[in-house]
Each structure stands twice: as structure tokens, then as C-alpha cells.
Amino acid sequence: MQIKQASLRKRMHQGLRTVFSWLPRDVRFSIFREMIDCDPAPDPRLELKVAETQQDLEDCFRILHDAYVASGFMKPSPSGLRVTIYHALPTTTTLCAKYDGRVVGTMSMIREGVFGFPLQSAFDLTDVRARQGQIAEISALAVHPDFRKTGGAILFPLMKFMYEYCTRYFDTRHLVIAVNPNKIELYESLLFFERLQESVVDRYDFANGAPAVGATLDLPVAKEIFRRVYGRRKPRKNLHDYFVNLRLPNIRLPHRRYFTTNDPVLTPATLDYFFNQRTDVFRELDDRKRALLWSIYDQPEFRTVLPMLVGTDESWQSMRRHQRFSLRCPAELQIKTDGDERLVVITVIEISLSGFQAQSQLDIPVGSHGIARVELGAEDRATLPVTVTRRHGHGQFYGFRLEEVNDVWRNCVSALETSHVATEL
């Protein structure tokens, strides 16, 4: 009897979806927007945080596995977890929603790293890159079945956390997604995502060959659209106020001493647990990807858990071997050009022990020497002699070599290196 009732409900749902699809697009989008229910005062038992412990991550990967299997986006894994190579990167952050201490929702945000983005295998990001600004792929979204019919009580806070994290902590301008065609209109109507291409990808390998639609959202542009569309609506339907202005006490943002833009949480032990013991992710990598992992995790503590190269190709040895870290630091550069002193405001976006990369709206002559004053954190400022070594990326990005390294800079790099090999939480 229960099976017959479930089958009937499924057929009714499919029938309603078919009828709904016949409505004009503007009417469908208007209906979606009327369904918004974003509670400005969620249940205090709900907590949103970065998944930072092994147990947090395992619970997230388990919920994700069950949701993907149920949707046909992956085959069941013996581990009961959905873990990908992107989860092994320090540029990926996994968020979790907990209710009464139990993980009930998750979402991952993937900054561009050595493996690019998952959706790059099917979608072209050339137009997005041309607009400048950092890109993050929003992926691995899942809500526990017990909370999927709660009117967005988990989903909306999780999406609000994602928006706040990306705009305040993740140095992100563009979001990109790859979703099933049945879900794309929710993102288009509520959040104003724009499709990367008109046609649907019939087989998206990252989702077990299911069809997919790629889309992107320019966050500064979206902020203005949210204000225009939602700004005068009642609180529970005002996504502009909910995303942009509201501060939810349920959200636990990470504490950072330095102006870093991501929160790596994987220790050697957790890497080994998820990618060697529970799954075969590391064993299935080719030599190039294995070498790329070695170039990222080049501290001695990781050597015993990273996959060894199996071939004889040694071209990987030319890869960059020193660690770089993503930050967003205000800075100023004092240089002398044509006999005149100039003060140029720059933004440092990546540092290493020997140099940094920065963005500037003004031209800086390559080869010039000067003094850089960099605010590494609220209470950490480094003053260093530098040389401009290169210019790249539409002329706004510059590489700098440090002529001397002081203790403030050295301590910052050391602290960031240590964050990769912190003791178990």
C-alpha cells in the first residue's frame, strides 16, 4: 500500500511539474519568487559553520553521497561518502549546517586551483574570466531528507552563509554552477544566475552522465538586482535584506589573524583518512595530478600520505615548488620613476616567502624598485624593499620580488604554512 501511495505521489508531482512548465517563463519566475520564505530569525538550534573537523566533513560527505545517489548523479560508493579530488585542495571550503549538533546540510565552494573547476570539463568560462575578479564554483549542495520539506529552513540560511562567506571572506566576484535542468530555473528566478550557454549538456561526467546546465552570477551586479527586485518586500520575502544586510547569529564565521581568503582545514591525518583509507581518490590519480598535489602540500608532514608517482616522466619536477598563499591585503608601493617619487595603492592577492602578487589600477614599470607597505592583518604590517619583476593578466597584475624579508612577513608565511599541518581538531 505504501509503495502504491509513493508511486501515486510521484506521478502527481511529475504531472504538476509538466503543467507548470507550460506556463510563460515570467509567470513561472514570479511564482518561484512568491514561494520565498527566508526566516530572519532562524531556530537558535541551527548553526552554520565551516566544516573543520573530520567528523563534520564525514557527515557532509555522507549526506552528499545519499543525495547524489538518490538523484542518479553518482553510483553508490562502498564508503557511503561522496569525496572528490577537489575536496583535497586548500582552495576548497566546505560549509555545513547543523541542527541540534547534527549535520543536516552542506555546500562546497571551490576556488580556482591546480585542477581548475569541475564544470570546466563541459562549460567554457572564457566570458566570465574576461570580466575579471575571482571565480568560485558552488558545488556539492545537499540537505538531509528530514529537512527538505521545511520551506527552506536549512537551504536559505546555508545560501545566505555562502553569499556572506564569498563576499566578505572568500574574495569572490563570480559564482559558477552546474545543475540539473530541472533546477536551473530556481537559480535563474530567485538569484538571477545567467546561463553560460543556451544548450543543455546531455552528459555531465562529474554528475554520472546526467544532463546539466551551467550558469554564473556576478555578485556585485546581483546585489543591485536584489535591491531592485526584493528591496520593498516583507522581511520573509526580502532576499536583498536577507543576503546583504542581515547578520544571522547562527552563522559562525572563521577567525583569521591574517587577511587570508580561504580556510584550509585538512591535516595529513584527515587527507589520509578520506583520500587513502575511506576512498580510492588518490590511487586513481594520474602522475600529473599526483605531482600537482605534491607541489601544493610540500611540507614534510604530508609526504607519507600523498600518492607516489608511478611513471618515469619527470617533467613535473619543473613545477613551482614553493608554497604560495591567497590573501587580500591593502598595500601601498612607494617607487621612483623618471626621478619622481610615486605612491601607488595596490592590493596584494598572493604571497610567498620570497615575493607576492598584487593588483593595481595604475601602471607600474617592470624592473622598478621601491618600498612596499603591506597590511597582512589587522595588527600585522610589513615594510619591505621590493622589485617589480613582471606584469600579466590584462595589465593589472604584477609580480614582486622581496629584496629583504623581515620578521613580520616571515612570521605570517610561517603561520600560514602551519595552518596546513595543525594538530587534529
Image (spheres, rainbow, N blue to C red):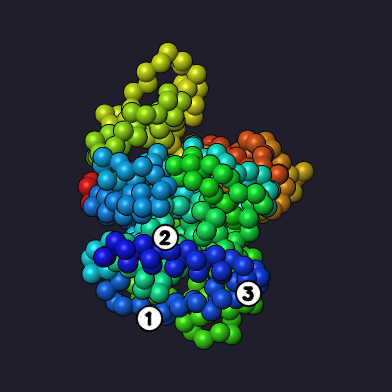
Mark toward the viewer: 2 or 1: 1
Q: Is residue 55 left or right of residue 391?
A: left
Report the residue at 51% width, 53% height from top.
Answer: 180
Q: Quadrant of residue 294?
A: top left
- Position of residue 289 relative to residue 40, above or below, is above
**Residue 379: assigned label:** 2
Q: Is residue 273 above or below residue 60?
A: above
Q: Does the image show residue 325?
A: no
The mark nearer the N terminus, 1 or 3, is 3
How many numbered circles are shown? 3
Sequence order check, earlier mark of 2 and 1 = 1
Q: Amino acid at mark 1?
A: Ala
Q: Secondary structure at mark 1?
A: loop
Going by the image, does 66 lie left or right of 109? Answer: left
Distance from the alpha carbon under mark 2 to that under mark 3: 52 Å
Closest to the observer: 12 or 27?
12
- Reading the chain from its start, which is encountered first: label 2 or label 3? 3
Is label 2 or label 3 in front?
Answer: 3
Say whether residue 215 is left or right of residue 284.
Answer: right
* Disc on res. 230: none
| CA distance for labels 1 and 3 | 30 Å
**Which of the numbered marks, if any, corresponds to residue 41?**
1
Q: Locate residue 228, reporting x and y percent.
A: 64, 77
x%, y% of residue 14? 47, 63
Q: Are marks 1 and 3 in contact (CB under 8 Å)?
A: no
Q: Residue at x 51, y 80 (%)?
A: 237
Measuring from the top left, give residue 374's x and y in whole percent.
Answer: 52, 52
- Give the amino acid at mark 2: Glu
Q: Quadrant of the N terminus?
A: bottom left
Q: Which residue is mark 3?
A: 27
SS of the residue under disc 2: loop
